Image (spheres, grey):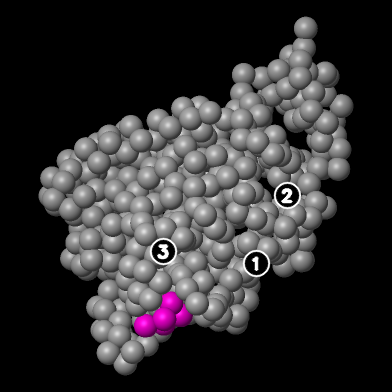
């Protein structure tokens, strides 16, 4: 009788320790052996010519979350996690949104109900929109203790934004509870002022979003949140760094010894401001916040990936339908930029695009690629050692990836609920041919096999990576 339920044999495996011709032995959904010429398993998978990678971990995803404009998000947990599996991602971290005036705990319970439709494993960021004493002193610590070890805050959007005093209170509460704070950093009032000035000047096209949200908007807010986090010795994760100047702010904080980390997203690495200027209403397909930047910013982001200033690439999957009065066309095709909902889908495209533009084009190596899409997000968000690496004892979340296969990206390949992908027509080299979760085939290269309800909500325990440093600007420790 074999020791293994499954052996993945003959591929080039990127394990936690090494890259080489290793077979992977799986039992009860867990990796139990890594080595050459493992004994036969009850099921054998031939991976010759393929890369054997840990399943992707996407730590910035929006599913089944209402847009503040009233537009409909195009993916719930069912279709969103299908899209993840089809792109080689086996864990997503989504946002459980508190409603202003409402309870965070109630919101998380309601969101967990929705997440019962998930086909793959998932965790929640606690999206704090109203940091009342009840939320910060009672609900947040209990939710963190229950396994939700990350908090998300916004510095802009009318129904989300926190002022600086609220941000400080939330940072302090998260630090005390043992949760990592993630931030959408943009200067709210400056966006508002610029938006009104642009509208008054008749500059209302999709591409003018980038004029309402120039880099200084992001740079200032990134600088400010880093300063507040430094003063409170609170580890911080900057979401969607879109260009050089905000990356430089993160680099400076890191050089000071701060626990400050950053992600960028696939779209900022391959698209740019010219995409928002496509003919007619097409530019709306590329409207996101922060806005797409210059080609020079794009290149700066690749450099930040190489030098480690940015160590996670997420999708910020926030899908809207394009040709839909509940989507991008909520206010018609002549709507001014400030009435067009922001967001792009990208869950399924993340691994293929980063591999193709990164590894195949020689910008990053294979190890860095795996770190960016799986290992680092798992470690940063307390999902390691079960997720993010091929290691004995880890969940058998594995992607077989053909590094030579050339694929033209289409909307149908995304398996999501949106009616478009911003990457339509782009040819990538390298594509997932199979995705396994806990040893079960969830995507066979063509079809998503995982069913709604197969995914598990992951509870995260305390973890060392996000422990405060104990260093304050003065000898005074405000938490003692
Ligand atoms: N920006 C966000 O902050 N969230 C989702 C969509 C977007 O573009
Ligand atoms: Zn955001
Ligand atoms: Zn987001």
* Chain part drawn in magenta: 204-208
Residue 182 picture location, percent across and down: 38, 57
Foreground disc of the pair 2, 1 = 2
In depth, the one of 400 and 178 nearer the eye is 400
| Distance (Cα) linking label 2 and label 1 | 22 Å
Q: Secondary structure at mark 2?
A: strand
Residue under the point 32% across and 51% down: 66
Spot occupied by residue 87 in the image (x, y as percentages of width and height) = 62, 46
- In the image, 450 versus 55, the foreground residue is 450
Figure quadrant of residue 137: top left
Write down the residue under mark 3.
328
Q: Which mark is residue 306?
A: 1
Q: Which is nearer the N-term, disc 1 or disc 3?
A: 1
**Residue in view at x 68 percent, y 63 percent:** 425
Mark in front: 1 vs 3: 3
Mark closest to the chain's N terminus, 2 or 1: 1
Residue 307 in sight? no
Which element carries disc 1, helix, strand or loop? Answer: helix
* Prevalent SS, magenta region: helix
Residue 48 part of the magenta-drawn span = no
Q: Position of residue 34 (x, y in %)?
A: 75, 30
Q: CA distance from mark 3 to mark 2?
A: 29 Å
Q: Quadrant of residue 109?
A: top left
Q: Which residue is mark 2?
A: 431
Task: Please indicate whether residue 465 sits to the left or right of residue 106 in the image.
Answer: right
Can residue 279 be seen at all in this image of the molecule? Answer: yes
Question: How many C-alpha atoms fall within 10 Å of the one at disc 2: few (<14), some, or many (≥20)?
Answer: many
Where does the image place residue 371, in percent across and percent down from the top left?
Answer: 62, 52
- In the rendered image, the vertical position of residue 209 relative to residue 115, given as above or below: below
């Amino acid at each position: 009788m074999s020791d293994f339920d499954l052996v993945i044999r003959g591929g080039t495996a990127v394990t936690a320790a090494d890259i080489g011709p290793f077979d992977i032995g799986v039992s009860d959904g867990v990796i139990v052996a890594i080595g050459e010429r493992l004994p036969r398993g009850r099921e054998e998978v031939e991976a010759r010519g393929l890369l054997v990678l840990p399943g992707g971990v996407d730590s910035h995803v929006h599913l089944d979350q209402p847009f503040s404009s009233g537009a409909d998000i195009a993916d719930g947990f069912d279709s969103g996690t299908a899209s993840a599996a089809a792109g080689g991602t086996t864990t997503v971290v989504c946002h459980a949104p508190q409603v202003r005036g409402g309870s965070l705990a109630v919101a998380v319970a309601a969101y967990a109900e929705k997440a019962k439709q998930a086909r793959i494993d998932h965790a929640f960021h606690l999206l704090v929109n109203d940091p009342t004493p009840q939320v910060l002193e009672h609900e947040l610590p209990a939710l963190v203790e229950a396994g939700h070890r990350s908090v998300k805050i916004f510095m802009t959007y009318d129904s989300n934004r926190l002022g600086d005093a609220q941000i400080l209170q939330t940072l302090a509460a998260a630090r005390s509870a043992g949760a990592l704070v993630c931030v959408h950093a943009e200067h709210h009032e400056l966006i508002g002022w610029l938006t009104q000035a642009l509208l008054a000047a008749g500059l209302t096209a999709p591409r003018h979003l980038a004029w309402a949200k120039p880099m200084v908007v992001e740079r200032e807010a990134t600088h400010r949140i880093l300063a507040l986090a430094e003063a409170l010795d609170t580890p911080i994760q900057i979401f969607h760094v879109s260009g050089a100047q905000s990356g430089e702010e993160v680099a400076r904080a890191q050089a000071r010894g701060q626990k400050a980390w950053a992600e960028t997203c696939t779209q900022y690495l391959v698209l740019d401001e010219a995409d928002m200027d496509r003919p007619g209403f097409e530019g709306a397909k590329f409207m996101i916040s922060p806005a797409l930047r210059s080609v020079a910013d794009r290149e700066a982001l690749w450099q930040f990936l190489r030098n480690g200033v940015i160590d996670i690439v997420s999708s910020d999957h926030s899908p809207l339908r394009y040709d839909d009065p509940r989507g991008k066309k909520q206010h018609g095709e002549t709507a001014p930029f400030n009435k067009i909902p922001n967001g792009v889908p990208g869950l399924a495209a993340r691994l293929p695009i980063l591999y193709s533009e990164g590894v195949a084009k020689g910008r990053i190596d294979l190890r860095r690629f795996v770190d960016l899409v799986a290992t680092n997000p798992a470690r940063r968000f307390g999902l390691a050692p079960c997720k993010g690496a091929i290691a004995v004892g880890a969940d058998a979340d594995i992607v077989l990836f053909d590094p030579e296969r050339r694929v033209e990206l289409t909307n149908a390949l995304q398996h999501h609920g949106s009616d478009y992908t911003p990457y339509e027509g782009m040819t990538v080299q390298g594509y997932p041919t199979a995705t396994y979760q806990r040893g079960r085939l969830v995507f066979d290269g063509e079809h998503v096999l995982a069913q709604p309800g197969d995914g598990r909500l992951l509870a995260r325990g305390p973890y060392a990576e996000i422990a405060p440093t104990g260093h304050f600007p003065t000898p005074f420790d405000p938490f003692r």
